[in-house]
Structure formats: C-alpha cells, structure tokens
Image (tube, helix red, strand yellow):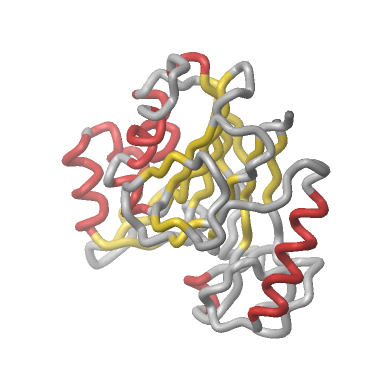
Amino acid sequence: MLAVTTTRQGGMSLSPYDSFNLGSHVNDSLQAVQQNRDILLSKLGNSSAKHIQWLNQVHSNVVVTIDTWSTEPVTADAAYTRQANLPLAILTADCLPILLVNQKATEIAAIHGGWRPLAGKIIENTVAKFATPSSQLFAWLGPCIGPSAFEVGSEVKQQFCQLDKQFAAAFSAVKDGKYLADLHAIARIQLQQLGITTISAMADCTYTNPQTYFSYRRDGQTGRMASVICINS
C-alpha cells in the first residue's frame, strides 16, 4: 500500500495556480494540470499503476466503489476499492483529506472531508463499504484549514451537535454567533465512534501556510492538492 499527499510546489501551473495544481475544474490550463497529474503518477513509485482515479467532488456524502478506472471523474466525495494498482485521489484546498486502509492492505478508501460531507456521515458511509471490521482499519488525516482559521456560523455547529453533543468540543466561540471549527477533531470523533482508534494525522493548516498549500478560503481563485492511496500488487 502507498499513500501520498501533495503540496503546491513542484509543478507546471502558473499563478494563481502555481505550481503543482491537480484540479482540472479551477480554470487552470488543462495542459498544465495534465502535466502535473503525470508528474504525480510517476512519483507514486508503482509502475503497474497506469492511471489515477479522480472524483467530481460535490460536497455530498456519496461513496463510490471503484472496480475499474474511469476516464471521466466519478461524481462522489469518497471512493473505495479492493483493486490493486488503482490509485484513488481526493482533491482539497482547505477541506480535510481522509485515507483509510485495513490491516492487510487489501481494502482502501479516500474521503473528501469538507464539513458538509462530514455532517452527512460520509466517514460512516465509507466504512460501511469495508468487509474488514472497523476496529482493524487505519485512518490518516491530512492537511486542512486549521482550528484557528476555520470560522463558521452557528448553523454548522448546530448540524454536528444534532448528531451528537460530543461535537461541541470541536467548536470554540469567537463573536457574533461565529465559531472556529476543528475538522481534525470532528473526524477523530466520528472515526472513534465507528471503532477506528488507529489514527495518524498531518495537522498542517492550509490557510496559514501559503508557501506550501493552496487555500480556497484564503485566496479564492487557487489550485488543489491531492491525497492519493493505492494497493500495490
């Protein structure tokens, strides 16, 4: 099994997508995006992986099972597979990338953890795809907008607290009915409630690290990073 996450550095895209933009939907040069995707595929270190499976992410709680590579992005916000040499990718520029794998590395998933998918229980929907008991799954949480930068309205906190009062701990009040939200904390709570306790994290804040990461909330027009997971044959 291999898993990687990218930064904004090392690619072919020009400003404001400079330089390793992997999103084809942000008005960047499609030629540059394809060059960047080719670079990413070459860096995976799996000569049997010929293509990466991309998603058309719509902030839903939909999970798709990928059995064969599709030339077109599949509309969903999480992907699951048991197929070897079929990398799954999630694009982010503030949202939380989540990667899952079982102990034997025979089942994997990639999740786009924006607050709407998380509130829609996308982690639970993804875990339900696994034949492996959840207690035998490993989770990785990637860089996203951090808890000191992600300001949301009270309605966001309310949606999570309606699911479980435990989520209140992931929000801190600031002013005028606004809260700072911690996506890592929200995901950890959900994973632990599902019985997943082996959780690793890369807690870099995309918003406060402009040299390293794209951030939609910071810049508006910007590129996308990718988090990729693959079963090696």
Q: Residue at x 22, y 58 (%)?
A: 154
Can you say whether 196 is above or below 204 in the image? above
Can you say whether 172 is above or below 1 in the image? below
Q: Residue at x 25, y 44 (%)?
A: 160
Q: Position of residue 229 (x, y in %)?
A: 63, 41
Camera sees residue 66: yes
Left or right: where does residue 181 sit relative to residue 233?
left
Left or right: where does residue 50 sit relative to residue 156?
right
Q: Position of residue 63 (x, y in %)?
A: 38, 43
Image quadrant assignment for residue 24: bottom right
* Quadrant for the C terminus in the image: top right
Question: Foreground: 173 or 197?
Answer: 197
Q: Position of residue 144 (x, y in %)?
A: 54, 54
| Number of marks in the rendered image | 0
Can you say whether 105 is above or below 21 in the image? above
Q: Residue at x 37, y 42 (%)?
A: 170
Image quadrant assignment for residue 22: bottom right
Q: Position of residue 130 (x, y in %)?
A: 44, 25
Camera sees residue 211: no
* Quadrant for the N terminus in the image: top right
Question: Foreground: 44 or 83?
Answer: 83
Q: Residue extending furthest left?
A: 162
Q: Residue at x 58, y 35 (%)?
A: 140
Left or right: where does residue 169 sit relative to residue 16?
left
